Image (tube, rainbow, N blue to C red):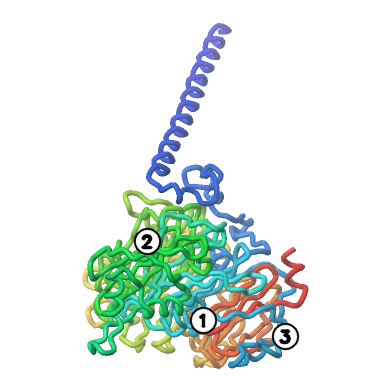
Amino acid sequence: MKNARVIGLLTLCFLLGLFTVATISGCSEKKESSGDIQSESTESTPESEVDPEGDPADQPSEETASNPADLFNFKLDENGNPVVVAGDWGQWGGTSYRNNTPEDIGIPTSWNVGRRDRETGQWSGQENIKWVSAVGSQTYGNPVVASGKVLVGTNNSGGYLARYSSATDLGVLLCFDEQTGEFLWQHSSEKLPTGRVHDWPLQGICSAPYAEGDRIWFVSSRGVVVCVDADGYHDGTDDGEVINQRARLFDIRVNEDPAVDLVAPAVAALGEGNVNETLRAAAAKAGFELPEEVSVATDTAGKKWTVTAKIGDEDRTVIAQIMGPKLSVFKIVTPTDTEEADTLWEYDMMGNLEVSQHNMCSCSITALGDLLFINTSNGLDESHINLPSPDAPSFIAMDKNTGEVYWTDKSPFDNILHGQWSSPAVGLLDGVPQAIFAGGDGWVYSFKADKGTNGAPELLWKFDANPKTSKWILGGRGTRNNIIATPVIYDGHVYVAVGQDPEHGEGEGHLWCIDPSKRGNVSPELAVDVETGEEIDHQRLQAVIEEDGQVARDNENSAVVWHYSVNDADGDGDISFEEQMHRSCGTVCIKNDLLYISDFSGLFHCLNAETGEVYFTYDMFAAAWGSPLIVDGHVYIGDEDGDIAIFELNKDAKDPIEEINMGNSVYSTPIVANGTLFIANKTHIFAIAIEGEAEAAAE
């Protein structure tokens, strides 16, 4: 018996030894495999793009993170929410959870923007205004603050670059110094030649950038994902794969009357190796004065020329080229052009993915580890009926360092109602990293937030945010909506409201709280054929047409936690204007289980985030395009009249303690960073702080 026990013990030790060896071997093989993958990725990436923020080994990645929570650049609390600390506010909503609730103290609840003298440009009568800077004439992009810089998307009416007059319509991303408001640099996106169907006049950049370290990512008005250096050319280097970039200085159009045509004489002079006074004067007006001594080389006779000159201590290059009915002149950008953006890489979604954005491309990028998540804005054409690119993706994930696309998804298919202007959220939900997109078909989609497989993501769940019998009618006359708001993640739930293009006016709205732990079709209802009892495919204009023998039935797999559309607050059996949730462009904001949201009819709603109980609605008497800010015990919301209403963070605080006018419409959302409140109205961005408070908070 003793020998048997010894033999058994020896056998057990032998087996454990084999298991240990196998485990070590397996770990070793896995580590080597990961190394091979990293090596391949490095080899396929241009040197200038590889890990702009340091050694790849120091960065969290899907391959190296043992815990999905480690992929986020913030900690999570016991409820799964981001642990927000005072500091920068580097993306729309501050984190990928998109809840606009920064932590800070001493934020003003009283200020005066003052008055601007139109002749001198000087401001007077200001109170608690740290600085103010001009932006465009229409500003919809929410400000972002990171690494000592303030970034805001707008149009070109600010006229910061000499080569583009303020009358030149562009989409621009402006960068200012956080402490002084001094203009630093501008990224310029010229209008698409296809016109308003893809690039609506004067809308500019309508989204917020994503900033991390010394890199900034945003979606341009041309449907291009752009990565730029946060320092621009102020660091003295031209970084990234985009080098020797051409920047338009001016155009001269051909005049059919030879007596007044300026192009022919300019072309003749270039052909003779000279730059005439017309070109010199135009270049000087564009901020690029040419010296007397220049060298002109003909690249294509009568069509293209390269002009080189020594300006200061630097050799500069200018390209002159006949392009259709005009002579276009470009400079080659160098690090001395500090007012220009330093572009690292670009990805053209229209060119590469055949996306056809409707009116504009508006997505505020977010990220998880090295992955960027983007809504492409694929939509209808000018007929508002035809979808020109049904096979183009609506949602994509790409590498933040290189622009490589990992996966694409076209889940809305040909059910897109209008455009797709929502932005994604990313969070760790029930242990799974989820990328949550709102589609142009009025559905919410959740994908596993990873690199996908064979170019496709794993769909986790989908949710129809409209009643099945609701109907889409052109011009906003129907009851079915798409989604413009950004989903928000709070306490393990997803919150989102439906709405439409503001031009469609007011209408019926819905606000949802969704349980993201469920899988599959988690809509409140299913569309069913009465005769067969089978679920039917989604129909674009109306999911259930009762006269065709279709019916909406409760979904046993529904993920609805609560739903808010109407609330008979006084119990009289009638639903008044103030007892309804209307269409909304706005995103919810939640703190201490208090949820706030504005709607396009001008109502400001406060609810219990856990139960959906409505605490109050407040009529602002003006449409609200933006979303609330909660900070320092107060709630801030702007409206189309330019008023900022400020409430105490309390379910019983039904009236604002202050209403402060910003001088003109506020279409964006207030944010706070480093002790300063930043608010952009249509034409200016204001840094608002009590004297001394911002400096103390920053320290």
> Is 539 placed above or below 490 here?
below
> Is 546 placed above or below 428 here?
below
Q: Which residue is mark 3?
A: 127
Gap in Å between the C-alphas at discs 2 and 1? 27 Å
Badge 2 marks a residue whose secondary structure is strand
Q: Is residue 444 visible?
A: no
> Is 612 placed above or below 6 here?
below
Q: Quadrant of residue 608?
A: bottom right
Residue occupying image coordinates x 44% and y 78%: 164
| Mark 1 / mark 3, whichever is N-terminal | 3
| Mark 2 / mark 1, whichever is N-terminal | 1
Q: Residues within 10 Å of mark 2 (few under 14, many from 20)?
A: some
Q: Residues within 10 Å of mark 1 (few under 14, many from 20)?
A: many
Residue 283 at x, y = what percent? 42, 76
Screen quadrant of the C terminus: bottom right
Q: Which residue is mark 1?
A: 158
Q: Is residue 270 left or right of residue 398?
A: left
Gap in Å between the C-alphas at discs 1 and 3? 24 Å
